[in-house]
Image (cartoon, rainbow, N blue to C red):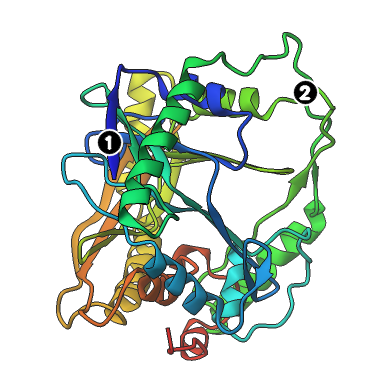
Amino acid sequence: MHVRELQWIEPVTAMRRLAHRPHLTFLDSATRHELLGRYSYLTCDPFSTHRVDDGQASCNGAALDGDPWIALRDLLAKYPQEHHDDLPPFQGGAAGFLAYDLNRTLERLPLPAIPGQGLPQSVLHFYDVVLSFDHRDDRCWIVSTGWPEPDPARRRSRARRRADEFMGLLAGSETPRDLFPGEAGAWHSNFSRQRYTAAVNRVIELILAGDVFQANISQRFSAELPASFDPLDFYSQLRTFNPAPFAALLRYGELTIASSSPERFLKLDGRRVETRPIKGTIARSCESREDKRRAEMLAASEKDRAENTMIVDLLRNDLSRVCTADSVDVPSLCQLESYASVHHLVSVVEGELAPDRDAVSLLCASFPAAQLLGPQRYDRWKLSRRSRV
């Protein structure tokens, strides 16, 4: 591994200088926080790609036989990462997205009533170079692993050469901005008001019948984008209006994902597992007294605390499937956290990963997040999961 410290550069500036490179991944702590928003990461030009479409895994376009999760585990084992404790934690490896529909590789489910849009179930790019940013200390580094070169001497040579390439990219100019960027057209929902109300009433019936613990009734909004629409400007505005510790911009060819989230799904540090479910939200007020009243109202809400506690219980069950006996704990329950536009109730669930389990096992046991379950009986859903990974 080759590590080179750089003079501080703002992550968004670096992002714009690398924006023309293929498969850009920007993991952005847009809200600074000692524990949750200390680091940001920027990378591009992957050397390998693991992708899942309709349950079929592929690597660099070539189909892989068998279970896609086992194929992912094999790829991760093929490119082991060194780890330096004095650097930000992500020092190369796989980054990308896992779509909700990837749960169909773990469960036997009927086809959704509303079809997808032809998007992959997951895309994980393998990166050999990462730009790491420490917001607390205003330090940044190029971390270059030299993969996929198998020979150690050649890998060291490749790591230095790739670090030089990224130095050149950072010294270049930013991607130019359109002075008059186009705006999206009118947004349209796939729900009418009547259908949405009917869906809510149906879920209430299922809850009262004991068939559902919880359900997310979500809408898909779509709009026509003009040719001049700039995803970089869109993301820059998103992180300005709604900064969050787990924001992200993924530019993967024709697909761009812009995300601004305060919620951590899973963290694996050594053998220690942490998940931070959020349930309970109220909009903030620009008037301090009213803002304080809203925060206190959320903290005292019996309904929101009950919902948060239910999710905590489901996540305790998830972690117990892959963690050592009696290690799963809840050190923080329904604590108030405040962000730019909302207050949340946040809990923390921890555990110690069992010796015979790994990060892929943890994902399989927990995916999708308990707070994203659809309207189906939870215990039946659990029993349908595969256990071989």
The spot of residue 145 in percent (x, y) is 35, 47
Q: Is 234 above or below relative to 177? A: below
Task: Give the numbered dot on residue 183.
Answer: 2
Which residue: 15% across, 74% down? 327
Q: Is 250 above or below relative to 214? A: above
Task: Give the numbered dot on residue 75.
Answer: none
Residues at badges 1 and 2 in contact (C-beta under 8 Å)?
no
**If the image is split into quadrants, where does the N terminus sit?**
top left
Instruction: Read off the residue under disc 1.
Output: 3
Q: Disc 2 marks which amino acid?
A: Glu
Which residue: 55% across, 27% down? 18
Instruction: Give the quarter of the image for residue 244.
Output: top left
Which residue: 24% across, 77% down? 323
Q: Between residues 245 and 88, which one lies in front from this camera angle? A: 88
The spot of residue 58 in percent (x, y) is 63, 69
The spot of residue 200 in percent (x, y) is 66, 64
Q: Residues within 10 Å of mark 2 (few under 14, many from 20)?
A: some
